[in-house]
Image: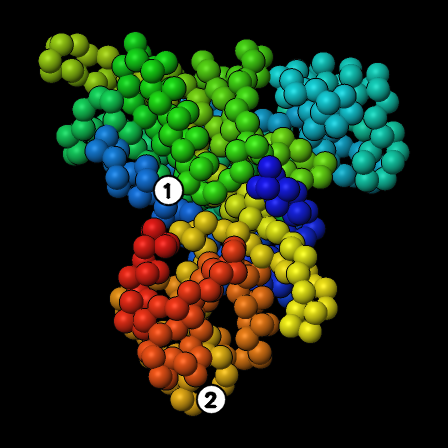
Amino acid sequence: MAEQTRARAATMEKIVALAKRRGFVYPGSDIYGGLANTWDMGPLGAELKNNIKQLWWRTFVQRRRDMVGLDATILMHPRVWEASGHVVNFNDPLVDCKTCKSRFRADHLLEDKFGRDDAAALSPEEMSALLREANIACPHCGNRTLTDARQFNMMFRTTIGPVSETGTEVYLRPETAQGIFVQYKNIMQTSRVKLPFGVGQIGKSFRNEITPGNFIFRVLELEQMEIEYFIREAEWEQQFDGWRDAISAWVDMIGLDRDLVRIREHDAGELSHYSKRTVDFEYNFPGPMGWKELYGLAYRTDFDLRQHQETSGVDLTYFDQESRERFLPHVIEPTFGVERSFLTVLLNAYDEEATTDVNGKEDIRVVLHLAPRLAPMKAAILPLAKKPELTSVAWGLYETLQAELGLMIDYDETSNIGKRYRRQDEIGTPFCVTVDFDTLDDGAVTIRDRDSMDQVRVGRGEVSQWLREQINV
């Protein structure tokens, strides 16, 4: 219950403010007034994002014998998206306000009005009828002048070639998965993999969302961590359950509160055109967002390989040498959003603790209880005072830790020690290492724990090993 109380200290407004103030996330093109729904990762955000991706890659690719990796291109042959069904099926229901010209997702309007989780499964005609019946007003201007719903394809188009009129029209990929399917045969031939095996990939995708928002939860340019796991059809239920457990273990690994995570099964009308079964791992975001998708797990059958085999004319079957069978593998797909992981980790870690300063005055300590393996800075070296005899020792320790650990270590000698502790708490640094005047006599330093604020004395030569054991990267 303590974890749940801590998570509820966060609001989206507080996270947005903290993210900019401390250099986690900046509005895109900020000096030009920004570009709607684009965000840049600042110095600390880049570290946190990379830590999430590196942990995912080690966990799901490098440490599994049944996995290999891929880094496919963003631009692909346009027929890829015809075969995958994205040209026809990758649509959202769009409505316009005739008065203020704002655009909205029809299913989101119905969800907000009626609380219907199945709104996305309705046809545009059914959505339009419900919108008219409820006489829903424009959320922006309040006028009741919404159009009927119509389908809107979310893929970004661009042109290859020096002249757009004669160039080849292609798409910015809306998902990373198709790169894996298209390269499946090459991977199978060059990596000598045998079923079951998976291919993991981290990469950018682009979706021309009608109503992106909620900070970095829904953006136009996103990064995905996806796996396509190739199996025999008969074992799909067993493999599905295994990957559901693997995603659950990942949720624990990045430190999310289990009370704020649930698994929701898609009903038949909600399933994507390629899926026989899908479950979402949802997180209970603060405020009106509530439960929203964090990760997904889908059983895609052999839809993708079959579509690409028929469209390309290339044989994509798998030959089992033991059984002498030839068949198209089926696929289990676990998919993880990088930005959603990033946002959820920040929301879950944010805390405000009532405390008192050295003068006994009541104060609020803002702290990010980030898992140490994810924290942008693993430790901070803080000389007690800006005195040459202390700073020289502190700089020497900083350089030693950088060389021995190969991790991000901060150094700070500005302002008093209390303010420096608070600064590190607010960016989630798990350990502060203070060089004080006793260090000059006994060669030991004081290490302060971010969460408990307990302090221990550790010899300078033992700090590296102590941190390595605590951080557990």
Indicate whether 5 appears above or below 240: below
Observer able to see residue 162:
no
* Helix, strand or loop for disc 1: helix
* Position of the N terminus by quadrant: top right
Indicate whether 341 appears above or below 278: below
Mark 1: which amino acid?
Trp
Mark 2: few, some, or many residues within 10 Å (few <14, many ≥20)? Answer: few
Question: Where residue 65 appears, x then y in whole percent?
Answer: 21, 33
Q: Nearer the viewer, residue 134 or 182?
A: 134
Seen at 32% across and 58% down, the residue is 468
Q: Quick check: 365 left or right of 145?
A: left
Indicate whether 445 appears above or below 59: below
Task: State the image quarter where residue 147 is shown.
Answer: top right
Observer able to see residue 232:
yes
Picture disc at residue 387: 2
Q: Nearer the viewer, residue 446 or 32?
A: 446
Seen at 56% across and 13% down, the residue is 267
Picture disc at residue 56: 1
Question: Where residue 372 appears, x then y in whole percent?
Answer: 43, 53
Task: State the image quarter where residue 67 is shown.
Answer: top left
Seen at 34% across and 51% down, the residue is 472
* Helix, strand or loop for disc 2: loop
First of labels 2, 1 by sequence position: 1
Seen at 72% across and 14% down, the residue is 126
Question: Where residue 16 appears, x then y in whole percent?
Answer: 64, 53
